[in-house]
Amino acid sequence: MGLANTFKVLSDPLRRNILVCLKEGKLTAGEIADKFNITPAALSYHLKLLKNADLIMEYKLKNYIYYELNTSVFDELIIWINQFGGENNEK
Amino acid sequence: MGLANTFKVLSDPLRRNILVCLKEGKLTAGEIADKFNITPAALSYHLKLLKNADLIMEYKLKNYIYYELNTSVFDELIIWINQFGGENNEK
DNA sequence: TAGCTATTTAAAAATATTTTTAAATAGCTA
DNA sequence: TAGCTATTTAAAAATATTTTTAAATAGCTA
């Protein structure tokens, strides 16, 4: 959904922390909810936003839903940021 | 005010566009308001957020207030993003 | 199949952000 | 000084986001 959406989704600390957790590997929705002490419904809302922004991917297995990181969107973000200097900025 | 604040401030498209404008050089509050067709009061609110996030700096001259870009905060942002791959990601 | 578990969805309530409007400030210029 | 211009501040209104609660779904397991 584009850069605007990426920025919006990353503006929430909980959502950023979910991504950091997923660096270690895939997790089920329930496992994530436990880590953050948030209700399943609230978590589900955040996971949906992350998924819409293509920051995570999901797949179903047994009656769990697994989530995993999708880092490809970060490239676009880096490009945006680099317009303000990039490489080795003036220090 | 830290990374969390940087992300929050950058989540708004208008604020990002203000930064892009300021790449060309300093502008007064009024000049920025003109470019974006926004009321001075609303703009002032956004400029305050950008300033709190250290993304812009201001100085007064005559009875204008000039704003200019401060890119130093982007470094921290890049570091955060790079934890998810960085350099040349797996393509 | 019956009931359980994991998770989502929907609607309402709670909360946070943004805009608007009006008034205040501060430094010009005549 | 008087009045003008540029801009901010404050409060309220408008809007958007997040959480809560309850119900729905879907795939297990006995």
Image (spheres, coloured by chain):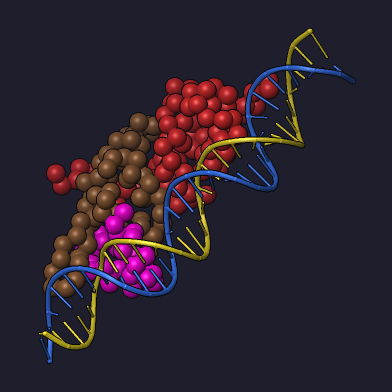
Chain colours: A brown, B red, C yellow, D blue
Residue A19: % across, % down: 30, 58
Judging depth in this view, the residue of B88 and A30 nearest the camera is A30
Q: Residue at x 48, y 23 (%)?
A: B35
Residue C16: % across, % down: 51, 54
Q: How many marks?
A: 0
Q: Quadrant of residue A73?
A: top left
- D26 on left or right of A3: left
Q: Say above or below: A27 vs B40.
A: below
Judging depth in this view, the residue of C28 and B79 nearest the camera is C28
Quick check: can you spot residue A16? Answer: yes
Does A45 lie within the magenta span? yes
Residue C22: % across, % down: 71, 35
Q: Residue at x 37, y 71 (%)?
A: A39
Q: Say above or below: D9 vs A51.
A: above
Q: Residue at x 32, y 45 (%)?
A: A6
Q: Quadrant of residue B13?
A: top left
Q: Say above or below: A17 vs D16.
A: below
Does B75 lie within the magenta span? no
What kind of secondary structure does the magenta stretch mostly adopt? Answer: helix
Q: Quadrant of the C terminus of chain B?
A: top left
Quick check: can you spot residue A88? Answer: no
Q: Residue at x 22, y 62 (%)?
A: A67
Q: Quadrant of residue C1?
A: bottom left
Judging depth in this view, the residue of B84 and A27 nearest the camera is A27
- What's the magenta region? A20-49
Residue C23: % across, % down: 75, 36
